[in-house]
Image (spheres, rainbow, N blue to C red):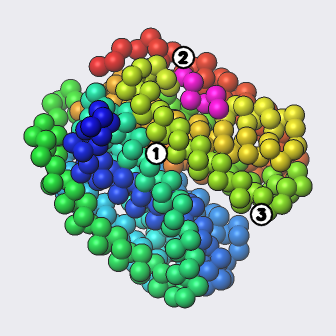
């Protein structure tokens, strides 16, 4: 049996746990919630701008909550933390299915973004970073595959369910599926027999120094934060902006909606393959060494958009963004564990998750303002290229830091 086969057999349960949680996080992700939007707007009789305001406000509120809530994974038994997060997702899915008033709509979306997109992904990736040392990169990349798997199969399933059941009963059906997955997640954790990893299910109490180091303000005082954060913000905000306005980009360049939808496959493929590739590279060269280059694939897409309007430009753009997002999702998390250590990795990741979620709300807002003021997409591509270039130069400073 190959070394990879032995690794997969030895860690199948923990990797399955990580994959399951990233897959289930899809129920709080924009790509899946967007399928409910027309039905929600019709039921609540609200405009595009009002729904966007509700969604953006709920997303930003959840982002700031994650900084506080995500830290508890460093202090609470992992099985208990997982159950709490999954029950939280179920509760807010149920609340949305029964919502008839705007305040409940806001609270429901807030909960989906917090427990789905935020804490489920956070639990999965923090666990992989903590459980694995020599094979941390591969483990994070394999757990991350739950994201593209959800993107590939769940939209088709949900659209079909909504056609037969309506959007409210579709939510009830999907929350029932999440309920069934709760004992599965705990089974995967308890089935693991590696004693060294089992000990990490129950975090040891923080020392006074560790308690201080884990506080958000203390993390923000470190040089490593200001090296990693700008690149993370750039990738999340600008990438989300281009993906959200991809149909408008197509109209501006006479690309058909059918081509835009079909061409988005390049994003999913680039994301999944680069995520896997990054895991193997990070185990060999370290996440710290690879971090400065992860924005470069998207830069090639921006360059193409600045100078050309042919259909292949769209493929290059979304593939570049996908490669950057997939490569970065692994490399960044490995680098965080290398620079901050696994003892406070949950607290550190919760802060970076806040930055990421906040950025996904900030990017579309910036794009909307620029488009309203008459800038075209080639201008936005130029601004993005300059921003990415500055972040890449800043990221080179990470090479001076020592791995703990």
The verdict on residue 381 being magenta is: no
Query: Which residue in the structure is indicated by mark 1?
Result: 354
**Dot 1 surroundings within 10 Å: few (below 14), some, or many (20 or more)?**
many
Quadrant where the C terminus is found in the figure: top left
Residue ID at (22%, 30%): 210
Image: magenta residue range: 292-297
Mark whose residue sits in front, 1 or 3: 3
Query: Which residue in the structure is indicated by mark 3?
Result: 258
Relative horizontal placement of residue 159, taking residue 136 as reference (left or right)? right
Residue ID at (20%, 53%): 189
Q: Is residue 284 visible?
A: yes
Tag 2's secondary structure?
helix
Residue 396 - label: 2
Is 363 situated above or below 225? below
Residue ID at (80%, 42%): 313
Q: Is residue 95 visible?
A: no
Tag 1's secondary structure?
helix
The percent position of residue 195, horizontal first and vertical second, equals: 10, 40
In the rendered picture of this protein, how many numbered marks are placed on residues?
Answer: 3
Quadrant where the N terminus is found in the figure: top left
Query: Nearer the N terminus, badge 1 or badge 2?
Result: 1
The percent position of residue 135, horizontal first and vertical second, equals: 31, 32
Tag 3's secondary structure?
helix
Is 112 situated above or below 389? below
Residue ID at (52%, 74%): 157
């Amino acid at each position: 049996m190959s070394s990879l086969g032995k690794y997969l057999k030895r860690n199948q349960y923990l990797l399955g746990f990580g994959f399951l949680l990233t897959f289930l996080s899809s129920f709080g992700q924009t790509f899946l919630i967007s399928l409910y939007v027309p039905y929600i707007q019709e039921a609540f009789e609200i405009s595009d701008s009002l729904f966007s305001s509700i969604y953006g406000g709920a997303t930003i509120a959840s982002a700031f909550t994650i900084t506080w809530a995500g830290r508890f994974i460093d202090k609470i038994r992992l099985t208990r933390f997982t159950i709490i997060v999954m029950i939280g997702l179920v509760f807010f899915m149920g609340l949305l299915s029964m919502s008839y008033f705007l305040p409940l709509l806001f609270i429901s979306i807030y909960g989906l973004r917090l427990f789905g997109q935020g804490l489920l992904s956070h639990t999965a990736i923090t666990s992989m970073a903590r459980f694995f040392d020599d094979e941390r990169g591969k483990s994070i990349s394999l757990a991350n595959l739950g994201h593209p798997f959800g993107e590939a199969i769940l939209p088709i399933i949900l659209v079909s369910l909504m056609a037969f059941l309506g959007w409210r009963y579709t939510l009830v059906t999907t929350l029932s599926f999440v309920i069934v997955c709760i004992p599965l997640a705990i089974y995967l954790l308890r089935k693991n027999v590696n004693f060294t990893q089992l000990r990490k299910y129950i975090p040891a109490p923080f020392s006074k120094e560790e308690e201080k180091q884990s506080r958000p303000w203390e993390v923000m005082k470190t040089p490593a934060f200001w090296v990693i954060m700008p690149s993370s913000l750039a990738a999340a905000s600008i990438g989300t902006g281009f993906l959200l306005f991809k149909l408008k980009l197509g109209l501006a360049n006479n690309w058909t909606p059918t081509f835009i939808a079909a061409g988005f496959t390049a994003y999913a493929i680039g994301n999944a393959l680069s995520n896997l590739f990054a895991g193997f590279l990070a185990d060999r060269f370290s996440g710290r060494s690879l971090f400065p280059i992860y924005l470069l694939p998207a830069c090639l897409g921006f360059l193409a958009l600045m100078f050309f309007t042919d259909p292949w430009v769209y493929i290059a753009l979304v593939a570049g963004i996908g490669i950057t997002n997939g490569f970065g999702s692994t490399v960044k998390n490995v680098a965080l564990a290398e620079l901050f250590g696994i003892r406070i990795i949950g607290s550190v990741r919760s802060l970076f998750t806040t930055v990421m979620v906040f950025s996904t709300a900030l990017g579309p807002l910036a794009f909307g303002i620029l488009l309203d003021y008459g800038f075209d997409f080639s201008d936005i591509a130029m601004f993005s290229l300059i921003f990415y270039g500055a972040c890449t130069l800043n990221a080179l400073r990470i090479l001076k830091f020592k791995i703990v």
